[in-house]
Amino acid sequence: MERSYNFNAGPAALPLDVLKKAQSELTNFKNSGMSVMELSHRSKEYEEVHNRAQQLLRELLNIPENYEVLFLQGGASLQFTMVPINFLGNGNGSYVLTGSWSKKALKEAEKIGKTTIAATSEQTNFDRIPKLNELSIDDNASYVHITSNNTIYGTQWQAFPTVENLIADMSSDILCRPLDVSKFKLIYAGAQKNLGPSGVTVVIADKNFLEKGADNLPTMLDYRTHSKNNSLFNTPPTFAIYMLSLVLEWLKDQGGTEKIQETNNQKASLLYNVIDESNGFYNGHAQKDSRSIMNVTFTLPSDDLTKQFLAESKELGFVGLNGHRSIGGCRASIYNAVPLESVEKLSEFMISFQKKA
Amino acid sequence: MERSYNFNAGPAALPLDVLKKAQSELTNFKNSGMSVMELSHRSKEYEEVHNRAQQLLRELLNIPENYEVLFLQGGASLQFTMVPINFLGNGNGSYVLTGSWSKKALKEAEKIGKTTIAATSEQTNFDRIPKLNELSIDDNASYVHITSNNTIYGTQWQAFPTVENLIADMSSDILCRPLDVSKFKLIYAGAQKNLGPSGVTVVIADKNFLEKGADNLPTMLDYRTHSKNNSLFNTPPTFAIYMLSLVLEWLKDQGGTEKIQETNNQKASLLYNVIDESNGFYNGHAQKDSRSIMNVTFTLPSDDLTKQFLAESKELGFVGLNGHRSIGGCRASIYNAVPLESVEKLSEFMISFQKKA
């Protein structure tokens, strides 16, 4: 077997066709006589890659004209700071807490200014997304921040709140389904789950909203620097953006977000069905109405069985099934690029493991 | 001809052997059943890559034990902000201005606190590095910041000042020669010239110095976050670090910094000799005692001749010879990975072009 069944939580599986394409032109990109990594970021060849990636994102997510598409660095973790220093001002940053990443985002905002918690599911170890009517938004909210999918807990927003100045960390589920971008003022996503390799962060933001950012910020932390310069103010992570463009071409070839959502639903159902039909042998962490189609989290009846499950699955070529230490158990991350076949193999293994146990 | 003669200023040429190695294992890294891009950053396979890159940097630059080696994101441009917010405090940031990049670094520090200019060569369009005895360091200096090599102007520090709390941007010449790291408290370098592809920034810093950073900084902008977590606080740009490790292996195979310095001197001499023996046809921008062995900048007698030079060189497969708009003319960037053969071809072309003109 050449390829593993890759269920890594991120960095994660990439489409094999994308890797093969990158491999085929790694030493000579489009007859330029050099690798895409060796191109100047000011060259026509590179700018085509850069602009194509933007254009594909616009097409795939139907991004309105009045939104910017930026390619930044530093991952979601740096966005946790950029959002409040640009937009918090004298108002309140209103955060919905649905897991570790939302809490980290809140922590960084607290260093910058005032914050409130609009809702939280921490009481039940983040096993659900708060209902839309549970949200308590401060009158003085500068923005409302949510995490659309929670990798560690396996929960995902099924519908988004209609509130002013909504900002979302979509690192782990962007492009998993169609999206109404116009509901958001700013969306950010580290690439290493659904978009490409680690090292590039996609930001999609309302142009007018960006213009309202604070003054006299460090140049690199001011979104306007990057919007004014088409994300070419400084040298961008060119190879990561190239890989992003290939992943987006691949997604377009798959039929786009509607088609990938069907496949994602099919993949997720395979695993959730095994869980639901296991008579409690597999126990899903997320409440049913909050289940993620990107990360399926579950526990087994004992730590010994969990260890055995992980050991046997590893023998069979499954990678990345360990759950995060904060909830234990197992996790299957089934991002866009994880083939249906891998998920079928996993569901078969889960059934046969239960029978033997 | 498959490969161009690549004289790009950055992103720049990479060793062909490095690209071929990356190509050979792009879909299956060391029998892991996946690309290095698909590995979890918490996996043993990736951690080996990460730690190997650190270890090679330590070996090649003879980095003392009490220094950290960090892999960050955002390029030198983000370091321009991280340095002052961590270390400026109530003192003065003392900047030596030797070109556009030093000025950008100063500009970011001015947003954070007090600064002084220790020396500048702006009066003569940055054609030289200030002499060590020209430096005027404020008694209250928090640190002294220099740019070791100036890509746009083609100048390079030949020896470094002995001052307290020296910080250097070495983006464009790190590893071009042996270095006494202990003279510096902190060195930073975007990778895309001598180290690898764009998307990773190397920081080498005195551990005690890092500990003295300001309190309550945004987590991602605090160097201690990254030193405490072995640069794995958040997902690092894993593929860029992998490429860095391959470039460092290559450099070790070449014989390390002493040997590469010899080759670099040989390459630079080839071009400077053509300039010096051209009876003023080619006019070097940098004063002789400040010449860079990484970027050779020169002008021709007229704009028409410059255009013709660039057009004919392009026809012959030379790439990236345009000078930066701030000084015009031509520039040959001859970083470590630019083969001697490319430089020989360029010197031959320069001689024949002059004969015809």
Image (cartoon, coloured by chain):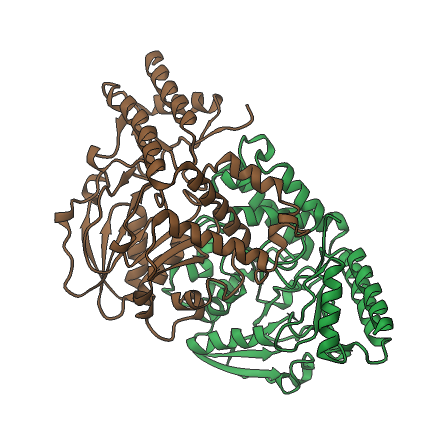
Chain colours: A brown, B green
Q: Nearer the viewer, residue A243 or B113?
A: A243
If the image is split into quadrants, where does the C terminus of chain A sit? top left
Q: Residue furthest top?
A: A356
Quadrant in the rendering for residue A333: top left
Quadrant in the rendering for residue A23: top right
Q: Nearer the viewer, residue B152 or B148?
A: B152
Residue B19 is situated, as x and y percent measured from the top left of the image, at: 66, 45
Q: Which of B225 and A274 is in front in this view?
A: A274
Residue A242 is situated, as x and y percent measured from the top left of the image, at: 52, 49
Q: Is residue B298 left or right of A23 when viewed as pictured?
A: right
Q: Is residue B14 left or right of A267 when viewed as pictured?
A: right
Residue B55 is situated, as x and y percent measured from the top left of the image, at: 62, 48
Q: Which residue lies furthest to the left in this view?
A: A133
> What residue lies at 50% left-to-right and 28% top-to-bottom?
A4
> What residue lies at 59% left-to-right and 79% top-to-bottom?
B97
If the image is split into quadrants, where does the N terminus of chain A sit? top right
Q: How many labels does the image show?
A: 0
Residue B182 is situated, as x and y percent measured from the top left of the image, at: 64, 64
Q: Is residue B336 left or right of B86 when viewed as pictured?
A: right
Is A22 rendered above or below residue A168? above
Residue B71 seen by the camera: no
Q: Is residue B204 left or right of B274 when viewed as pictured?
A: left
Quadrant in the rendering for residue A354: top left
> What residue lies at 65% left-to-right and 69% top-to-bottom?
B151
Residue A189 seen by the camera: yes
> What residue lies at 36% left-to-right and 22% top-to-bottom?
A347
Q: Nearer the viewer, residue A185 or B306?
A: B306
